[in-house]
Image: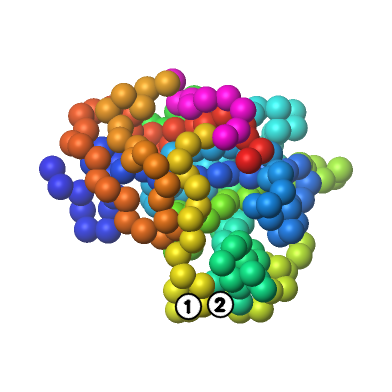
């Protein structure tokens, strides 16, 4: 059966590679994403534009459960999109430019009380995990809601509950990092610098692919891909792994 308009069929759509950065207590600074230096700790995963904040939270906390305090009730996971400033590239226009950021939203781990329940598709992905119950925040928001482009990064700040037991507010700081116009209405993201090589030829971090090791019926194009370009479609899949992503080992490159 064909997927409804606007819905991504994960059985027939090629996933893309994503670096998911994480830090306790705050977001990473934008200058820490300089590709000429060692990148902060991150997960390497494969996922789809329809991936929700609930799914990202599940992938992160199931792979690295010690990131969460114990008990985890009241913990906020805030997410930001990190992307190149194509309107105002750096002085070396042929190389990496500056980065900007945009808030994606938050997920708050509850105690089983009121909150947003997972969709039918999400319930299969997060089954048995901490994100399987009702969550506060905006767990249903997706990467495509923020106009994610292949080659962008996602950064997560894990905020433990406050001393009084309350939920910590999202980390402070400019959502756009003080670098001028951001994506906003996303009308100008194609201006300025042209496509750049993103070097997605393979893993350079520690560890190998996760997700049960069953990428079996999937299809991941080899070689380097350009940021934002359409990837070749894979062969028809069966009832293979249809989860929120294929986790990778922790990486620093």
Residue 1, x across and y down, in percent? 13, 43
- The residue indicated by pointer 1 is 191
Q: Is residue 151 above or below residue 250?
A: below
Residue 42 falls inside the magenta stretch = no
Quadrant occupied by the C terminus: top right
Scheme of image coloration? rainbow
Q: Is residue 173 above or below residue 79?
A: below
User: Can residue 38 be seen from the camera position used here?
Assistant: yes
Q: CA distance from mark 1 to mark 2?
A: 6 Å
- The disc at residue 112 is none
Kindly identify the residue that appears in the image at 21 percent across and 53 percent down.
4
Q: Quick one: 142 or 229, which is closer to the camera?
A: 229
Residue 147, x across and y down, in percent? 44, 64
Residues marked 1 and 2 touching at CB (< 8 Å)? yes
The secondary element bearing badge 1 is classed as loop
The overriding secondary structure of the stretch rendered in magenta is loop
The boundaries of the magenta stretch are 204-212
Kindly identify the residue that appears in the image at 44 percent across and 33 percent down.
246
Residue 136, x across and y down, in percent? 58, 49
Q: As drawn, is 248 to the left or to the right of 166?
A: left
- The disc at residue 87 is 2
Q: Quick one: 230 or 224, which is closer to the camera?
A: 224
Residue 209 falls inside the magenta stretch = yes
Which of disc 2 and disc 1 is earlier in sequence?
2
């Amino acid at each position: 059966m064909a997927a409804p308009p606007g819905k991504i069929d994960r059985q027939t759509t090629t996933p893309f590679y994503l670096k998911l950065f994480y830090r306790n207590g705050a977001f990473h600074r934008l200058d820490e994403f300089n590709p000429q230096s060692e990148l902060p700790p991150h997960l390497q995963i494969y996922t789809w534009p329809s991936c929700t904040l609930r799914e990202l939270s599940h992938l992160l906390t199931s792979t690295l459960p010690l990131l969460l305090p114990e008990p985890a009730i009241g913990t906020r996971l805030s997410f930001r999109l990190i992307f190149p400033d194509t309107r105002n590239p750096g002085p070396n226009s042929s190389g990496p430019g500056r980065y900007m950021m945009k808030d994606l939203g938050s997920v708050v781990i509850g105690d089983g009380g009121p909150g947003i329940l997972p969709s039918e598709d999400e319930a299969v992905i997060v089954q048995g995990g901490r994100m399987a119950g009702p969550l506060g925040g905006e767990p249903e928001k997706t990467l495509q809601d923020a106009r994610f482009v292949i080659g962008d990064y996602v950064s997560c700040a894990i905020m433990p509950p406050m001393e009084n037991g309350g939920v910590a507010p999202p980390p402070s700081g400019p959502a756009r990092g003080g670098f001028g116009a951001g994506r906003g209405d996303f009308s100008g993201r194609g201006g300025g610098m042209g496509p750049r090589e993103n070097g997605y030829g393979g893993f350079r971090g520690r560890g190998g692919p996760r997700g049960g090791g069953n990428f079996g019926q999937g299809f991941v194009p080899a070689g380097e891909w350009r940021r934002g370009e359409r990837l070749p479609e894979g062969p028809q899949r069966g009832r293979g792994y249809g989860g929120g992503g294929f986790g990778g080992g922790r990486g620093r490159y």
